[in-house]
Image (tube, rainbow, N blue to C red):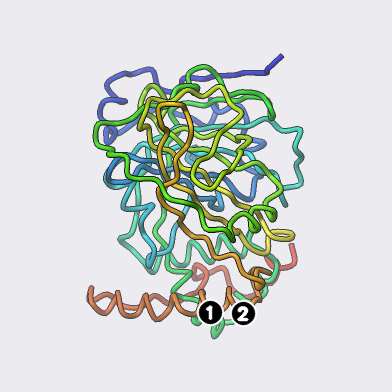
Amino acid sequence: MTHLKTIQLDNNPASLRNDREVLTVQTKGNLTRLDIIQSYRVAEFVTLARDGSPVCWPLAPDFEDGQLVFSTGYVYPAKARNVQRNARVAVLYSDPTASRRTDDDPLVLIQGLAKADDMDLQRNTERYVDQLLRKGPLMFRAALRFHTLRQAFVGYLTRIWIEVQPQREFVWERGQMPPDPLCNAIRPSSFPPKPGIELPQEIFKWLLNYQRLPVLAYLDQAGWPAITRVQANVKHDHITFESKIQAQPGAPACLTYHRLVGNYLANDAFLLRGHFDETNRFIPEKVVGFQGTGDDRGIGSIKAMRVLLGFRKQLSQQLEKESRPLPIARPTPGLGLKNNHRMVKS
């Protein structure tokens, strides 16, 4: 039998009609799987694009004061801009890699209302350095002890923070179908399906690197973004799923493949964005983020270093146009190198 627990954290329909309404619900005592939420090193995070279609990327999660907390780079702000247009988001905790937990865990889906903060870039940068020193990959924690290296990576370390107030929680057993409220995918009136594409041949070789099932993001029958793991059968021009999810013709979706390389050395991912057709097949329209090469060892690899260092130039150019100063990449003043050393060794 499927273990299912569905909790409505906010029963006020008015708050669902107005996504930007200030909420007073206290969620810390209501979420039932804080053991998973507080320990996972990666979570699948879905925002809604301008046309109402879901976009799902794996992000490093945190949990503070009853809210789910994420960040994105100031030089690649699409997730934050999506949140500013439409506050509805979804977060799936489904990958226990490097968390000291196992695949015995169920899947945990949180649907909530998000807000993005890009006002104080200096404070945002310090907050992210603090987070990395506390729970980032070991090699990164070691590198961040040195000011010169931190400042070299300032383009990556300068962040926009996204905080999510949970609204609904779904919990179901791994390998089982999602709960009934998540089994219908709808098409918003703002989304126009585009012509499908043929997937590049090299992607079929690269798919072999992903041992876990991909995650499928879509809009549920209530109009919230939703996510689940799916068995995907990938063909050159369409994909079918072994799932009971039924979609309206033209319903948008996003199929995300990702993995934590090694023991959290890097978060490697790419997306297939598209729509469902009248036979419930997924028709890919675009491939996003595919960078499959022989140099994918994560932090320390030539590819990763080029990307991280390139962000500094992008950030400098962008902040110069905005007449904003370049942040100093450092932990929060007062923590000190002694405390940083303890963080690295912990």
Q: Which residue is mark 1?
A: 306
Q: Residues within 10 Å of mark 1 (few under 14, many from 20)?
A: few
- Give the numbered dot on residue 302: 2
Compared across the picture, whether 146 is left or right of 196 comes to right
Whether residue 245 is situated above or below residue 302 in the rendered picture = above
- Give the numbered dot on residue 73: none
Q: Residue at x 58, y 26 (%)?
A: 243
Q: Quadrant of residue 120?
A: bottom left
Compared across the picture, whether 301 is left or right of 335 comes to right
Q: Residue 249 location in percent, x, y?
A: 37, 28
Mark 2–mark 1 CB contact (< 8 Å)? yes
Q: Residues within 10 Å of mark 2 (few under 14, many from 20)?
A: few
Q: Residue 172 location in percent, x, y?
A: 63, 24
Task: Please state, as top left, top right, bottom left or bottom right, where the C terminus lies in the image.
Answer: bottom right
Q: Quadrant of residue 188?
A: top left
In the picture as drawn, the residue positioned furthest to the bottom comes out as 148
Q: Residue 129 location in percent, x, y?
A: 53, 66
Q: Residue 299 location in percent, x, y?
A: 64, 71
Q: Kindly state the secondary structure of the residue where label 1 is placed.
A: helix
